[in-house]
Image: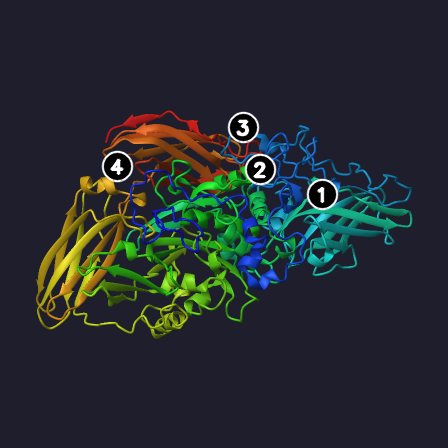
Amino acid sequence: MPSPTPSSGGPRSDMGRWGGNPWQPPTTPSPEPEPEPDRRSRRGGRSFWARCCGCCSCRNTEDDDWGPERRGDRGAGGSGSRSRRPDSRGSDSRGSGSRSRRPDSRGSDSRGSGSGSRRPDSRGSDSRGSGSGSRRPDSRGSDSRRPGSRGSAVNAAGDGTIREGMLVVTGVDLLSSRSDQNRREHHTDEFEYDELILRRGQPFHMVLFLSRPYESSDHVTLELCIGNNPEVGKGTHVIIPVGKGGSGGWKAQVTKSSGQNLNLRVHTSPNAIIGKFQFTIRTRCKAGEFQLPFDPRNEIYILFNPWCPEDIVYVDHEDWRQEYVLNESGRIYYGTEAQIGERTWNYGQFDHGVLDACLYILDRRGMPYGGRGDPISVSRVISAMVNSLDDNGVLIGNWSGDYSRGTNPSAWVGSVEILLSYLRTGNSVPFGQCWVFAGVTTTVLRCLGLATRTVTNFNSAHDTDTSLTMDIYFDENMKPLEHLNHDSVWNFHVWNDCWMKRPDLPSGFDGWQVVDATPQETSSGIFCCGPCSVQSIKNGLVYMKYDTPFIFAEVNSDKVYWQRQDDGSFKIVYVEEKAIGSLIITKAIGSNMREDITHTYKHPEGSEAERKAVETAAAHGSKPNVYATRDSAEDVAVQVEAQDAVMGQDLTVCVVLTNRGGSPRTVRLHLYLSVTFYTGVTGSVFKESKKEVVLAPGASERVTMPVAYKEYRVHLVDQGAMLLNVSGHVKENGQVLAKQHTFRLRTPDLSLTLLGAAVVGQECEVQIVFKNPLPVTLTNVVFRLEGSGLQRPKILNVGDIGGNETVTLRQTFVPVRPGPRQLIASLDSPQLSQVHGVIQVDVAPAAGGGAFSGTRGNSRSGETIPMASRGGA
């Protein structure tokens, strides 16, 4: 096992991840270790921002609600200071690293009514099991969130004395149902919540029910609070006098006074903190003062608002907002540039419980409430918290190939199961790789109101020494020296773009910002990355924050080939300038087509602007003079033909040599084939071929190497990828040929068919058909099924599937929301992964209209499913 590295602080246990760590069959499971609970204490109590953001460390030193969670004080900051109660005893069962707050025996927080304890509603008590992310009702057995009747009396604060003539608020209607005006106008009507969910910088309406008619001499004040120690100066305590205007863009006006009802229009600040606020009302008149006690039914969620021009996350394109904020599913691309695979991902940002999970992530990081109005800070915290390193975040990364103690990253079909598990248990979820980290990040940022897209970069460099080059070493015969190849080129890498202004940077760097939650050596050893302006990457301005050098190297570094000489020294023999970041794509707006966004990240390859960007960046790297020793005789060109290789079948690799010179050329060609993880980490060479080729001027010749299934079967690792190293030497002029080509073995798709019409609240059936492409039995086969508005995450255990066998199974589900939906399925087994399928389901409204809220989608985790039918090949 390689030695620990300074940047990671521990051994590189994931053999499929790190360059210079060739794959070997693991003898013991080696998932990425979960950080120790007391990891923060070993850093001397320094806050997260003090360690990863120097500009913020001074600003927040006096912030009482800053820092990691205190033991015994796990406040749910997204919901004021309310605590999460996982078990029936009111204590958190996650151990010393989880920092729980004990509620009292009544199921409420012992801090009193002002603290706003979290009381999950009765809808969370379903029997969906461990995979459902259920919410527990409080110990009194009642639904503390059930809306009361309008005008029902509310106890007064203080001593409870109500004097004649006082203006008593007897009830509040926040117009919070999904069909009400507020939710529709704020584009939050898809959230499966009954609470009021608002986007900041936009007005909303409410109705107050009073003990007597409202008079012009009456004073009414609205108050919102969030956090353990709400303060006006930090924006965590908002005071809004009705009719007089408030501070920072908050204000409220009377729109109608009719009898004992008072209608208000409330304007929120475009800079408001995001999170879950407690809400109360104070009144004052000659007869005395009254304060409405805090009621959890009146809590208010506030989110970022890309519809508001005054919000720095504003997006000036409605179709962008529909795609990057409101779309609950998307496409994630993988594979290689020549063999692009795609899978549908269920973001599920509106599913019940997901919003609470997103806010809980901020709480677990200990992010100060006063800083939660800044999308730059929020996105940076999310990039750190979606991975488990440093802070016991959402997902444990694992590139070892052994997922026996968790879920194979290829088996996930969406973010909901992951986020609800983290919310329910507080434990990091095993396991994730780059596309899973990116999918979850898209969910979290879209849920909080940031326009976000999932981006795939093909031939993505992983620069380990800040040289801004990918250095690959070969011996005298141009055979790879894997023990020296610490840099690696990932077949693909997936991250996120989110949209915002950057007031912390010079002008010209607004717009798309890269956020990458995959744990890598960025930010001086802190496992977060971004937000980094795409414009700074495009122009090689690697001194711009955050983490620009690392991201620039991923998309626009050069691949430098070094050959060992007879005296043991190394010489640059070839520089491949177009190998890195060859294609950057995302899902297109409004369709499932791919959109090429390479031009947003880099100038055209080989152009003067692109070379200037590379030179500018390299000047700030650790090897500014790396090209000084280049040789440039290139008469002979080499190209690898992409083959449509299928898992379980024989294949052929083909190399084409072309003589572009005016004289004959003799080439000694070497082909080395090995399996590879998508991260560029390879196994040992299992097949090689050597051949001498004579090329006439202007002539081309194809060199082939057949590979049988039995030859590669025992060597396969995740995703069935292979690396072909091509090297050669031209006898006449000494030219060195070097080329690396990665290809993958294609896996079958699942076929999904809807059996009957889909209607909200009515049971519907889907049929899933799969044919095993391998001549061997698939053991312990697990299907996953998920779709927002259709089906909560569901796990189906189907046992073994024989070699070349076809199986069919049927599943029922109950749609809960109308409209076009995506139902997504995956299959995983130790012998075969990366198998998935999707079907669009157009759900009709229920006969009475509206959404169905009975079961929120049936979900039973770990259910054993009998096969409907089995067939042969």
Q: CA distance from mark 3 to mark 1?
A: 30 Å
**Which residue was labeled with disc 2?**
849
Q: Nearer the viewer, mark 3 or mark 1?
A: 1
In the picture, measured across the screen, residue 538 lies left or right of residue 804, that is right
Look at label 4 and name its amino acid.
Pro
- Is 594 rendered above or below residue 812? below
In the picture, measured across the screen, residue 554 lies left or right of residue 326, that is left
Q: Nearer the viewer, mark 4 or mark 1?
A: 1
- Is 857 rendered above or below residue 69? above
Look at label 2 and name its amino acid.
Gly
Query: Counting other residues with Cα less than 10 Å from the Cα at mark 3, is it few (<14), some (14-19), or many (20 or more)?
Result: few
Q: Quadrant of residue 504?
A: bottom right
Q: Quick one: label 3 or label 4, which is nearer the N terminus?
A: 3
Q: Quick one: label 1 or label 2, which is nearer the N terminus?
A: 1
Q: CA distance from mark 3 to mark 2?
A: 27 Å
In the picture, measured across the screen, residue 272 lies left or right of residue 334, that is right
Q: Of helix, strand and loop, which one carries label 2?
A: loop
**Which residue was labeled with disc 4?**
773
